[in-house]
Structures are given as structure tokens and as C-alpha cells.
Amino acid sequence: MNWIEIGLYLTSILIWGSTWLVIKFQLGVVHPAVSVGYRFLVAGLLLLLYCVIKGHKLKYPARVHRLIALQALFLFCINYLCLYIAEMTLSSGVVAVLFSLLTISNGIGARFIFKEKLSPRFWIGTIVGTSGILFVFSGELKGFELTPVQVTSFFLAIVGTLSASAGNLVSKKIFQGDVHVIPASAIGMTYGALYTLIGCAAFGLPFEFEWNTRYLSSLSYLAVFGSIIAFVSYLTLLKRVGAGKAGYMSIVTPIVALILSFIFEGFQATPLVISGILLTLIGNALVMLRSKSRR
């Protein structure tokens, strides 16, 4: 990876690592699914406004709009709805372990659909990194028992992860043509918000809103940083390095969240947790760094 790609990667994981803490301020009166709809509606409209001001092309052929609509369904709707609902009954650690499988599903999809060449080092790094995640959250996994409700949440977390992976692969297809990341993301986030809000209305969820600093500030952060900046950075990275390597952020992001929890919430790091973090960083180096022969 060059310095631009490293910058895009760090931007994505640092912001998404912080959103794990910020999302807590969204929980309360407003249903999580409705908050997801609000988040992407604000993000989509802001990005559309930016595109209009900057004169970015927003008119694409119907074929491209169909792909963006499909991307939005997987990446900005089903993915978030499933994971938000899963976290209502599963611990964040269990969800983090399941979501780390995104790297594997991205890698398999990229190999068979786009013929991306993924070296043995990629798979070794992925296994090492995933093992690190298991070490980090071993305490939560040890006492984990599947009740009937948790079985449903477990299934939803898997569906959410596979949906995110499908969205990544559709994104790769979109950006193979003459489509720029920012306008495509603006359209996609708007589509995703509409899917989510229409779904909420269909299930009879109330469209409530909290007019307080806690909710408004967290919504603003998630829309501007967690959606616009993070997704534009990540999708640009995906366009440059492929879905396999870009997907490794799903393993590193929980580690960033854990470090922030240690700083701001007093999380106690055990030797096992520290070992897991080191394994994850080693896996990250194996996946991301180029060998000298390829430079």
C-alpha cells in the first residue's frame, strides 16, 4: 500500500472504531432501525448537496443505478439493520467476532467473481487476525449461551456480515466503470435511507426524534464522519486495492474500539486481550504490506 492508501485505511478504521462508542448515544427513545434511516438520509442529502455545489456528475445509465440500488440495499440497509438488531441481545464482542468474517467472505468473493489474486500471506494474515479477535473477546465468548432469541440474533449478525460483503463486491463492480466514489455514495446512501425508512413504516415503527444535544450530536457524527468520510475513504480504498484487502478493516476496527474504550471507559486489558491485539496487528501487517519483489 502507498501512503494515500494507508491514509484511506487509517481514516476508515479510526472513524468506524469510534462509532462503536458513539452509537450508544443513539439508543433510547428512537428505535435503532429508525436511527439508521435518519443517519443515511442526512449523509445522503449532504453528499448530494456537495455534488451539486462541486458540479459532480449525478446522471448515470439505468444499469449503473440498478447496481447502486443493489449496493445500497446490502451496504446501507440490510447490513446495518441486522447488526443493530443483533446487538440488542448479543454482546458487542460476539458481533465483532462474527463481523470479522467479512474479510474471509470478501476474499472468497473477490477471488471467484473478480479473479483478484490473493497470496497465501493474505490468508495467513486473515487467520492470524481472526485468531486475535477470538483472543480479545474470549471472555465474552466463554460464557456465551444461545437462547432462542440469541439464535435469531446470531443468524442476523451472520446475515448482516454477508450483506456487507455483498455490498463490497457490488461496489467493486460499480467502480470498474467510469463511476466516481462520491456521487455513487451520495446516491447509494439516499437509496439506503429510503429502503430503511420505508421498511420501518411497513413494520409500524414510530418515527420519533430526540431534540437534545446527546442525540443530535451523535447523529451528526455518525452521518458526517461515520458515513460520509468513512465510507468514501473505504470505498476509494476498495477501488484501489480490491475487496479482499479492504475488508480486513472488519478485524482491525473492533481493536480500535477496544483501545478507545480503554482510554475513555476504563476498560481493563488482560494479558490475553493484549496478546489478541498484537496478533491482530501482525495479521494486518501480513495482509497489507507489500513484499519487496512487488514494489
Image (tube, grey):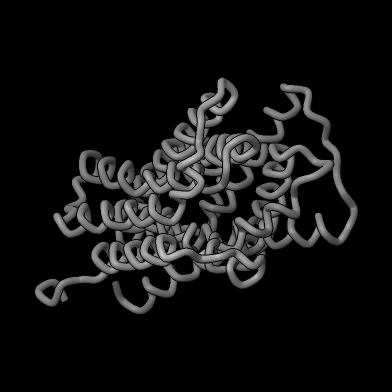
In the current view of this chain or complex, which residue is farthest to the right? Answer: 211
**Viewer-side residue, 79 vs 62:** 79
* Quadrant including the N terminus: bottom left
* Residue at the (15%, 56%) spot, across then down: 119
* Residue at the (49%, 57%) spot, across then down: 254
| Residue 253 drawn above or below residue 114 | below
* Quadrant including the C terminus: bottom left
Instruction: Kindly indicate the quadrant of the structure image that contains residue 109.
Output: top left
* Residue at the (35%, 67%) spot, across then down: 278
- Where's residue 123, x and y in %? 21, 52
- Where's residue 17, x and y in %? 54, 62
Q: Is residue 164 left or right of residue 106?
A: right
Asked if residue 123 shows in the view, the reply is yes
Q: Is residue 208 left or right of residue 148?
A: right
- Where's residue 29, x and y in %? 84, 41
* Residue at the (82%, 59%) spot, across then down: 214
Asked if residue 55 shows in the view, the reply is no
